[in-house]
Amino acid sequence: MSGSVPQPAEPGAASPVDPVAPIDRTGGYLGPTGAAAVVAASRATPARWRLLLRKATFWAGASIVLFWVVCAVFG
Amino acid sequence: MHWFGTDPLGRDVLSRVITGARDILIITPLATLLATVLGTALGLAMGYIGGWFDTVVSRIVEAILALPFVIIAFLFVVALGSTVVTITIIIGLVFTPLIARTVRTAVLVERHQDYVSASRLLGESPARVMFGEILPNVMPAIVVEFTVRLGYAVFAVVTLAFLGFGIAPPTPDWGTDIAANYSGLLAGYWWQTLFPALAIATLVTAVALLADSIEQVLSA
């Protein structure tokens, strides 16, 4: 039995079954695997930046920098 | 009421700490942005063109990096004067080779990828391949380098100010204030030095936290 273990998907990753099969630049049909790859690639960067918003260190650093920016602007 | 006390001239330390953030937060991002733009262009050219161009520019970059930052900065400040614009340009130029070296390393990995070969075969110009194809793929490394250099730029600005080559007094500046008042530490006037130093420490720590979180996310 060759059961492949499903890997956990990243936030924002494409669904394996895409209802709209995209076509490539030349008009050729990409197929289900190609379609998923295209959608995943197009969503990869926003997913990364969403991960950043979940990091406590990012919010701590941003808060302190924002404090000094406010001081510089309104001080 | 003076929450942070006053300096020997009777000026409020809290006000000077708050106002002192202004020049640092103007110079630091602009200088780092300048260094990133120049360093990225140079690094892309070095990595993509390669050959004798890469060899010659790499040796020049290494020669510049062998010199201490302070020495180079002193030369430029003495020659050009210490204004916000000149200090921004000096720090930007001094950091350019550092960023160029990082970008070059990233480009050397990318230039052998299939998509670069495909772009060449399609007849795209070298500039189009560098900036349209390779640049987006090395952008994470550039973003991380930018945030890391931002922290170093804060130190650079403060170092120049501390050594007397920063923004001229009486404009409030953290480094200048520390330089003017640190001799009072032994006499017990600790607040004149402590609060500007804390301001520097918090800003550098904050930038380091940002850089660390961005690096973790982009390398995931």
Image: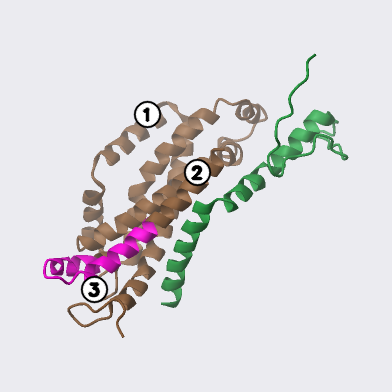
The residue labelled by disc 3 is B169
Q: Nearer the viewer, residue B194 or B48?
A: B194
Amino acid bearing label 2 = Glu
Is residue B202 part of the magenta span, yes or no? yes
Corner quadrant of residue B204: bottom left
Residue B184 is situated, as x and y percent measured from the top left of the image, at 14, 69
Instruction: State the green chain.
Output: A
The residue labelled by disc 2 is B215
Q: Secondary structure at mark 1?
A: helix
First to last magenta residue range: B176-204
Marks 2 and 3 on same chain: yes
Q: Residue B55, which numbered label?
A: 1
Which quadrant, please, contains the N terminus of chain A? top right
Which quadrant, please, contains the C terminus of chain A? bottom left
Tally of marks: 3
Amino acid bearing label 1 = Thr
State how far apart marks 1 and 3 are (Cα): 44 Å
Left or right of residue B180: residue B143: right
Left or right of residue B156: residue A72: right
